[in-house]
Image (cartoon, rainbow, N blue to C red):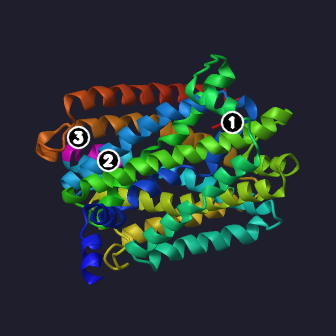
Amino acid sequence: MKKLFNIIKNSVPIRNLALFLAVMGPGIITANVDNDAGGIATYSLAGANFGYSLLWSFIPITIALIIVQEMCARMAVATGKGLADLIRENYGVKVTFYLMIALFFVNLANVMAEFAGVAASLEIVGISKFFSVPIAAFLVWILVVKGSYRNVEKIFLFACVFYVAYIISGFIAKPDWHEVLKHTVTPQINWTLDYTVMLVGLVGTTIAPWMQFYLQSSIVEKGINADDYNHLRLDVVVGCIIAPLIAFFIVVTCAATMFESGISIESAKDAAIALKPLAGPYASMLFSFGLFIASIFAASILPLSTAYSVCEGMGWDAGIDKRFEEAPEFFWMYAFMIIVGAGVVLLPKFPLLSVMYFSQVGNGILLPFVLLLMLALINNKEIMGEDFVNTRSLNVITWIAVVAIIVITIVMVVFTFMYSSKVTVI
């Protein structure tokens, strides 16, 4: 019996599974966090306003997300450094400083949106934001300040499980699965202004600058090296498939209920409330619960990503496993993002919608610069070594994806400025 146990333990599939579980985390967490309050609002509006007609877009979105995230993972294991670190070392302090300033303010605006999502999700069940937001902010702060990287990662991975609420909501909504499949595999592009803005919004909300910085930093802090790359790549790919799948089911849920009933919504909170008479109280509760988990999850990660990025870019010590005395800038910045992000949500006349617009415009302006710097770094053999640079064929695919993302984000910025009264989807 003992001999049989040892054979099973040392078998290749079991060993590979164990290695995968050991490195699992950074890719899955990073991709899923992007389904935040703003993302859920965008996906809800896509389904409510356009039915199933935008489902096809999740296939190219998933491919683009995999390409971009995989490059970050490869840079992390090849160099053992975060993205901000590499930019500072290769392009100088000045470039890094301006990039970090932009990232800081864009992420701060996003953190405000996440705490607004916390408030909105719990107001549905009658809990005041003056109670929910301060409690959420304290829990988010204590999680990182008092936790270790290993424990924090476990909590984040556990939080990812709750996104299944949106998949369950999708089935409770009883969509026409034949129509769902047809629109998923058959693009039906409508070049009207509203449709184009929504399409751009779906792409823009799925790939954000902070994701690249956080993924690379978390891989480095976890200590994953080149020997574990194949298992890390699987983690990244799995995360980049799961996140759009959750978004897909949010669109399906709202299309099968609100679009079919001709009900108009303006936010994810409206979607959760509207589901109650259309798909029953369970669908509504699951939808609002998903919004709460997504908001508090992102409210934890975005300040953490910002603290990692800015501290790396400025050459300061950073890391959850550090003591406060070892990395004061890291912990102060994390706390500042949470205090300001949560505090403004409690102000009665704070222009939160305008701030959310700013964050999306900022993401759109910043992302092309980040992607171009990543491409330059990953093709530098002195940095990456012979084995980890892009191959010629991969470069062609990557450039196509990156150029498409850049064009789309530029269009998003233009639309946001020109048609701000219509771009509530973003």
Q: Nearer the viewer, residue 22 or 4?
A: 4
Q: Residue 326 at x, y = what percent?
A: 31, 76
Task: Name which residue type carries label 3.
Answer: Ile
Asked if residue 328 is among those painted magenta in the image, a careful observer would answer no
Task: Name which residue type carries label 2.
Answer: Cys
- Magenta highlight: main SS: helix
Report the quarter where the C terminus lies. top right
CA–CA distance in space, label 2 to label 3 = 9 Å
> For residue 177, which numbered disc appears in the image?
1
**Crowdedness of circle 1 by 10 Å Cα count: few (<14), some, many (20+)?**
few
Q: Which of marks 1 and 3 is in front?
A: 1
Residue matched to label 2: 72
Residue 55 horizontal side relative to residue 235, left or right: right
Quadrant in the picture for residue 366? top left
> For residue 378, which numbered disc appears in the image?
3
Residue 267, above or below 369: below
User: Does label 1 or label 3 sit earlier along the sequence?
Assistant: 1
Q: Nearer the viewer, residue 161 or 340?
A: 161
Asked if residue 96 is among those painted magenta in the image, a careful observer would answer yes
